Image (cartoon, grey):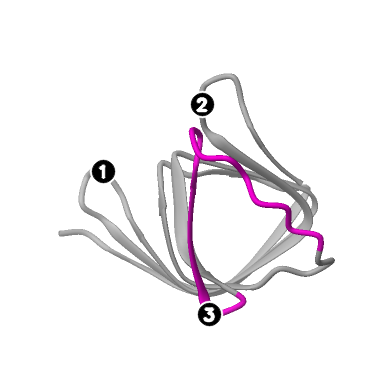
């Protein structure tokens, strides 16, 4: 389920989330690389913006001020994701192989 929170951020709620090939850049310049990660239980993702390719094909950008498209599929796949100001919460998480580089 997708919605906007009171602060104008995009909020996505799901039962599980699987990420591969993640590269995170922090405000201090550190780069975190994660091969794969799985989040499950009640998963909540908040972001200023989220863009990528829906089902690997359709370019899409979501943020707190754009109308949210209906996503009726039980499983949604996105590739080439770029997200800004992300907060993620889950009941459980598993991370496989990560590195941290300070610049």
Q: Main secondary structure of the magenta part?
A: loop
Under circle 1, the secondary element is loop
Q: Which mark is residue 57?
A: 3
Task: Kindly identify the residue that appears in the image at 71 percent across and 68 percent down.
Answer: 76
Residue at 62% across / 76% down in the picture?
55
User: Does residue 100 sit above or below 91 in this rendering?
Assistant: below
- Label 2 Cα neighbours within 10 Å, binned few <14 / some 14-19 / many ≥20: some
* Residue 11, position as x, y percentages in the image: 63, 39
Between disc 1 and disc 2, the foreground one is 2
Going from N to C along the chain, the mark reached first, 3 or 2, is 2
Answer whether residue 70 is magenta in the image. yes
The circle on residue 27 is 1
Packing grade of label 3 (10 A; few <14, some 14-19, many >=20) is few
Residue 69, given in percent of the width and then of the height, sits at: 65, 51
User: Separation of disc 3 and disc 1 at Cα?
Assistant: 30 Å
Q: Nearer the viewer, mark 3 or mark 2?
A: 3
Residue 46 placement (x, y as % from top left): 57, 40
């Amino acid at each position: 389920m997708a919605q906007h929170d009171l602060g104008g951020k995009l909020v996505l709620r799901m039962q599980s989330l699987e990420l591969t090939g993640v590269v995170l850049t922090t405000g201090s310049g550190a780069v975190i690389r994660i091969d794969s990660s799985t989040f499950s239980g009640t998963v909540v993702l908040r972001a200023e913006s989220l863009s990528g390719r829906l089902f690997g094909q359709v370019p899409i950008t979501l943020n707190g001020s754009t109308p949210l498209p209906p996503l009726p599929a039980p499983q949604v796949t996105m590739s080439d994701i770029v997200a800004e100001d992300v907060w993620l919460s889950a009941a459980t998480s598993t991370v496989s192989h990560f590195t941290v580089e300070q610049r």
